[in-house]
């Protein structure tokens, strides 16, 4: 029964869509309602664009209405001025123009992001009437512009034909959006929303990722504009108002900003509300505002979130059949636990006189260390001694003030983070960086985004390469989760995990990239005994597989157990280097750690230095 | 010179918005998009006091100040406080834009959509000053804005409360651990910002009319002032506002009526590219 329902789901969706398409022809929708459906469809395109940019990628680019205007005027102008009334040409031209405008207005976002981007894009929306006025030769100014009748292969696209066009374009867009957002690319948008630093550590150029987001977000807005110009046959600047921008934003949060189909729900609520309640005009702004406020505070996953919660509750109580288990856990979920990794292509990482100053503060001064493949190199030292600074320099989050950074024979110091990551440097964070709205399995698989890339086109078209790539990603991620002993959380939301589990997830993520050098930043702190044992085993396996491991750790017993070589930092300088035994015997190190100045000749072997933290 | 006076008077309004943003930003680290709407409500309350009730100047100003301060407190309670401690970056954007939109809508529903004329408090005969003409009420607007802006700047740098507010904008938890009542400071900032916006309702209304959709364009120009002055710098915001006003006035005078907004937008982009921390930047940005 269960399987039956799920097998026929696609068929059901198809049936609904066909019904929607033929509804006006068979008399299910009269003129008023078919227009309403078209208006909802057009608004849902605008909202969907905002969802991509704001809901998924977390970029505050609110210029949808400006791009909508661009789409409308470009399509209108081509028809009126050049007689290019072919709808395909109009849609394509509108898309191209909006992509260009979206890129240009997105440029501030590349450097600034946040509020500045929000203000630039809001500003752009308020400028639409001015720009229409300035270019009144082309746009018809404040009086507006009557558009030509759209055509396709000699047919006039009006009435039912226009209805079909609108619905088909919307179906096409939402198919593209679904396939893109529910893929690793969409996952990478979510990573960007959480932390651009995390995205760059995964080897993604934040710059290019943001441009991609702006382009993808601009396309539906432009399509909506072109369709609107065909629907109304008239374009005037008073369509493209700040209030419309607010209603798009409200529809987005009402439907659920981080969802694909929430856009349709939100658009329907807004459009129907506006048409149904005669009082709406008076209270329009108050209603939009209230939606924003309530959605922002209380149910920030929108109607889609409520629907999913309701569905989950119904399933728990057995009112609905349960989801098939295969949906969550990929094949091979119960296989034997691996005990060794495939060989890793480890490489020597070497710093030569590496320095970093912040203003006058020399955080790292002339540090030369070397880490070899198949070895664990530990960096220890008190707080503020420069350990994390050194890691940040190695992975490119800081630019060195002096000295060289060599990966094998290659100088990589000063390169941007994502390039260094692509050379095969993976890292974890002192405070794990964990995105929202993603399963643990999907997050671990993002580690493979760069090195096992599946292009955007295969993802959108769901080509066989896409399926093969994703099956491989999921299998590998699952195997790694089993390796670090947390396969049971694979299907859980990764941001619901406890700190200790998050650290293990980060280790699995860094392994997924097939890196050559692993930077582990205080990976042991906050772990309990059993998690620590798993971690030790995992690091041991990386060493055996030939990976280069650099470990920053406060837990001195753990370091002694794991490290082949230890470098001690103090106040930004290298204090000592050596094997664990040498370091244990080093009086300066002991002095640094215990604060003692006068020590016995033979330090007794039972010592556990008073480490500042983490020595559980 | 008349253009300069016009620019300074318009600029004073932008400065006021920037000052209001900064008061809240400095004390609680949140950006209150709805501040321009508070000023808009201030102009309506000034109209209600001066025209509907026929009150003299001082009670009108007090009424507007108290009224807007109360609205600001309600906004803080409804739109800001529920989100404190949440990590998502655009939470307060959504809720403060929501609050701003509600205020727009309520103003339209209560006072209507037609602009209302707020009477000038001073004799409405243009003065000739430094070779240009200026209305006395605009001169008062410029003067009081300067006084408030400079006063707040000195206050934030030289008093214990001001420094505490800087500290809590920098790091709420650390400031709280030092014994600063972060919550009170945040609430107080909203009250002060609201009161300042209310006090100026009469003067601003005399220049702009009281109109329900005054807010969002002022919000954007106020943000341009912040971009020029650097976020968190009261003095910078003050100067940034006047600079924006001058650019606007000169563009309107010498390029054409359709252009001033476009020119200001251009300046805005230029500043963001060349000096993303503003010309007087004391930016509060930091890497995670």
Image (spheres, coloured by chain):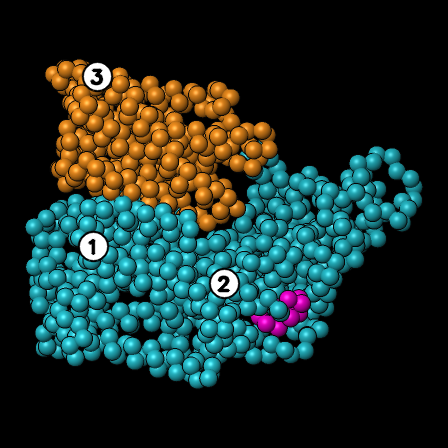
Give the residues drawn in magenta, as a range.
A477-486
| Secondary-structure class at tag 2 | loop
As drawn, B276 above or below A416 = above
Q: Main secondary structure of the magenta part?
A: helix
Instruction: State the mark number for residue B56.
Output: 3
The residue under the point 46% across, 84% down is A1
* Circle 3 Cα neighbour tier, 10 Å, few/some/many (<14 / 14–19 / ≥20): few
Whole-percent x and y of residue B230?
A: 39, 33
- Name the residue that disc number 1 marks: A277
| Secondary-structure class at tag 3 | loop
- Where, by quadrant of the figure, is residue A20 drawn? bottom left
* Circle 1 Cα neighbour tier, 10 Å, few/some/many (<14 / 14–19 / ≥20): few
Query: Which one is nearer the viewer's eye here, A2 or A535?
Result: A2
The subunit letter for the residue under badge 1 reads A
- Name the residue that disc number 2 marks: A438
Looking at the rendered structure, whether the residues under marks 2 and 1 are on a common chain is answered as yes
Whichever of callouts 2 and 1 sits on the residue coming sooner in the sequence is: 1
Q: CA distance from mark 1 to mark 3?
A: 42 Å
Give the mark toward the camera: 3 or 2.
Answer: 3
- Where, by quadrant of the figure, is residue A427 drawn? bottom right
């Amino acid at each position: 029964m269960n399987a039956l329902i799920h097998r026929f789901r696609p068929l059901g969706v198809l049936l609904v869509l066909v019904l929607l398409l033929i509804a006006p022809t068979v008399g299910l929708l009269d003129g008023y309602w078919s227009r309403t459906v078209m208006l909802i469809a057009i608004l849902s395109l605008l909202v969907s664009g905002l969802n991509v940019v704001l809901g998924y990628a977390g970029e505050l680019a609110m210029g949808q209405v400006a791009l909508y205007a661009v789409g409308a005027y470009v399509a209108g102008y081509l028809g009126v001025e050049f007689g290019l009334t072919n709808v395909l040409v109009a849609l394509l031209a509108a898309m191209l123009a909006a992509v260009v405008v979206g890129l240009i207005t997105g440029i501030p976002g590349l450097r600034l992001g946040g509020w500045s981007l929000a203000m630039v894009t809001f500003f752009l929306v308020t400028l639409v009437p001015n720009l229409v006025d300035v270019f009144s030769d082309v746009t018809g100014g404040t009086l507006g512009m009557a558009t030509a009748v759209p055509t396709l292969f000699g047919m006039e696209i009006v009435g039912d034909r226009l209805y079909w066009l609108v619905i088909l374009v919307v179906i096409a867009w939402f198919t593209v959006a679904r396939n893109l957002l529910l893929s690793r690319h969409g996952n990478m948008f979510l990573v960007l929303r959480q932390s651009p630093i995390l995205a760059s550590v995964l080897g993604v150029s934040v710059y290019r990722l943001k441009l991609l987001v702006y382009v993808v977000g601009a396309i539906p807005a432009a399509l909506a504009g072109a369709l609107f110009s065909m629907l109304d046959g008239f374009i005037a600047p008073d369509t493209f108002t700040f209030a419309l921008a607010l209603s798009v934003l409200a529809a987005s949060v009402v439907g659920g900003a981080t969802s694909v189909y929430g856009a349709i729900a939100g658009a329907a609520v807004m459009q129907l509300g506006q048409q149904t309640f005669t009082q709406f005009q008076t209270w329009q702004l108050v209603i939009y505002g209230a939606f924003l406020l309530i959605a922002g505070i209380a149910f920030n996953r929108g109607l889609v979130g409520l629907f999913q919660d309701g569905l989950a509750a119904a399933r728990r109580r057995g009112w609905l059949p349960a989801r098939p288990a295969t949906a969550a856990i990929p094949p091979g979920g119960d296989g034997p636990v691996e005990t060794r990794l495939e060989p890793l292509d480890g490489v020597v990482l070497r710093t030569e006189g590496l320095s970093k100053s912040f203003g006058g503060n020399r955080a790292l001064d002339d540090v030369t260390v070397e880490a070899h493949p198949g070895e664990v190199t530990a960096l220890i030292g008190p707080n503020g001694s420069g350990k994390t600074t050194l890691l940040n320099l190695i992975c490119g989050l800081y630019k060195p003030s002096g000295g060289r950074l060599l990966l094998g024979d290659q100088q990589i110091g000063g390169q941007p983070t994502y390039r260094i990551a692509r050379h095969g440097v993976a890292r974890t964070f002192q405070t794990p960086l964990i995105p929202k709205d993603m399963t643990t399995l999907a997050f671990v698989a993002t580690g493979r985004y760069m090195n096992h890339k599946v292009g955007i086109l295969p993802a959108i078209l769901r080509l066989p390469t896409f399926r093969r790539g994703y099956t491989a990603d999921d299998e590998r991620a699952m195997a790694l989760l089993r390796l670090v002993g947390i396969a049971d959380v694979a299907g859980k939301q990764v941001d619901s995990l406890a700190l200790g589990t998050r650290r293990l997830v980060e280790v699995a993520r860094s392994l997924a990239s097939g890196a050559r050098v692993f930077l582990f930043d205080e990976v042991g702190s906050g772990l309990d005994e059993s998690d620590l044992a798993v971690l030790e085993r995992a690091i041991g396996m990386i060493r055996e597989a030939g990976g280069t491991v650099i470990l920053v750790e406060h837990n001195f017993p753990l370091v002694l157990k794991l490290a082949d070589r230890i470098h001690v930092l103090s106040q930004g300088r290298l204090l000592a280097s050596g094997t664990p035994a040498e370091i244990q015997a080093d009086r300066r190190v002991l002095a640094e750690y215990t604060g003692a100045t006068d020590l016995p000749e033979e330090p007794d072997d039972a010592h556990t230095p008073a480490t500042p933290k983490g020595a559980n | 010179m008349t253009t300069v006076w016009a620019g300074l008077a318009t600029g004073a309004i932008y400065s006021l918005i920037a000052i209001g943003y900064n008061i809240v930003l400095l004390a609680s680290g949140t950006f209150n998009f709805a501040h321009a709407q508070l000023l808009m409500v201030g102009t309506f309350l000034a109209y209600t006091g001066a025209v509907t009730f026929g009150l003299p100047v001082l009670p009108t100003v007090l009424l507007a100040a108290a009224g807007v301060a109360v609205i600001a407190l309600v906004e803080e309670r409804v739109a800001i406080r529920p989100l404190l401690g949440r990590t998502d970056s655009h939470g307060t954007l959504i809720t403060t834009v929501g609050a701003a939109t509600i205020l727009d809508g309520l103003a339209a529903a209560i006072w209507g959509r037609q602009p209302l004329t707020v009477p000038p408090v001073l004799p409405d005969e243009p003065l000739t000053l430094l070779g240009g003409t200026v209305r006395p009420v605009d001169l008062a607007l410029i003067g009081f804005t300067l006084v408030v802006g400079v006063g707040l700047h000195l206050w934030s740098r030289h008093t214990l409360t001001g420094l505490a507010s800087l500290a809590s904008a920098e790091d709420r938890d650390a400031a709280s651990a030092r014994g600063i009542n972060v919550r009170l400071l945040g609430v107080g900032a909203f009250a002060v910002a609201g009161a300042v916006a209310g006090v100026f309702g009469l003067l601003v209304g005399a220049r702009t009319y009281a109109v329900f959709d005054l807010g969002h364009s002022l919000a954007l120009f106020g943000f341009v002032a912040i971009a020029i002055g650097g976020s968190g710098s009261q003095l910078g915001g003050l100067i940034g506002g006047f600079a924006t006003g001058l650019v606007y006035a000169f563009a309107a005078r010498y390029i054409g009526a359709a252009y001033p907004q476009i020119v200001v937008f251009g300046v805005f982009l230029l500043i963001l590219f060349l000096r993303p921390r503003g010309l007087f930047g004391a930016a509060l940005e930091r890497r995670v």
